[in-house]
Image (tube, rainbow, N blue to C red):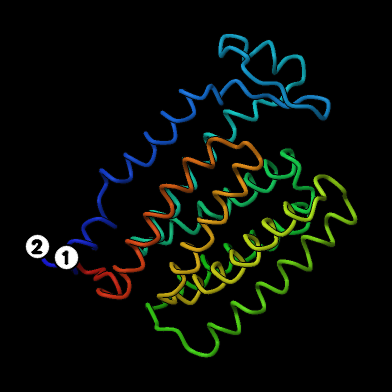
Amino acid sequence: MNTKTLVRSLVHSKYIDLFGVILILGTCIVRDFHGTYYQNGEMTFGIPISDLWPQIKNGAIPLGLWSIIGAIFSVLSARLIGKQNNVGNMIGVATSASSGTIDYLFGNHSAIITYPISLFLNSFSVFRWNNGVTVRKRDRHYYLIAFIGMILGFALVYLGAYLFGGKTDHAFLIVVSLTFGISLGANFANAFKYEETWLSWAIYNVIQLIKNIMLVNIANVAKYIFYLLNSVVTLADWKLNGDVDKSL
């Protein structure tokens, strides 16, 4: 099997889809992340799954389970987008809303103004792909998109921290700004199917690992390790093989 065939088979493999889901579930169960709850502005950890309903009845949000479910759908979204299936972008709309809420509860209060933009860009990708778009190589517009995304990322994250509080130490804000800025550029580039969309996501995933370790969001740590490997393979596939033949 040559390299072109290998990377395409990896991107389109249902077994790797399943592996991504199992990886997240396994990691979260081992770390007892499903026992994480949010109530009255505070986190509680290690609550048994048997106490799920009593906790909910008392007004607690099962943030651990919510994060796990969101992470699973995010993985499926990324895999489907890599397969050039527009359903992945549709799932991305929902996961953007979910991820924004989770990030806010974990202390990133700037999420209240940053994630609606991601939600819009995911919706824009659905529209663009639905109307037909082919894989394209980078041009000067790609670099402009990446630059504007980074500027907006820093501006909006720091503005959100100033307006809404939450975690405001500079190390945290810089990491959040970098990830958001890169994601803005990557999401917009995805709408136009730039090959380098996946290079942007590879860089994004490295930084997200750092951010989610800081947030102690174990579900997302597992997710972004998988994402990093997936983005590298998908970048190779889009560069070597281009568009998927829809007639097959």
Q: Is residue 215 above or below residue 164?
A: above
Instruction: Measuring from the top left, give residue 190's x and y in whole percent.
Output: 49, 70
Which labelled disc corresponds to residue 5? 1
Q: Is residue 245 above or below residue 143?
A: above
Image check: 206 left or right of 112? left
Badge 1: how crowded within 10 Å, few (<14), some, or many (20+)? few
Query: Residue 37's quadrant in the figure?
Result: top right
Which residue shows up at 18% across the image and 61% down it?
Answer: 6
Q: What residue type is labelled 2?
A: Met
Instruction: Measuring from the top left, give residue 18's x and y in whole percent.
Output: 32, 39
Query: Residue 216's quadrant in the figure?
Result: top right
Image check: 227 left or right of 159? left
Which residue shows up at 45% across the image and 30% down it?
Answer: 27
Q: What residue type is labelled 1?
A: Thr
Badge 2: how crowded within 10 Å, few (<14), some, or many (20+)? few
List the residue tagged with mark 2: 1
- For mark 2, give the secondary structure: loop
Tell me whether the residue at label 1 lies in contact with that at label 2, contact meaning CB atoms closer than 8 angstroms: yes
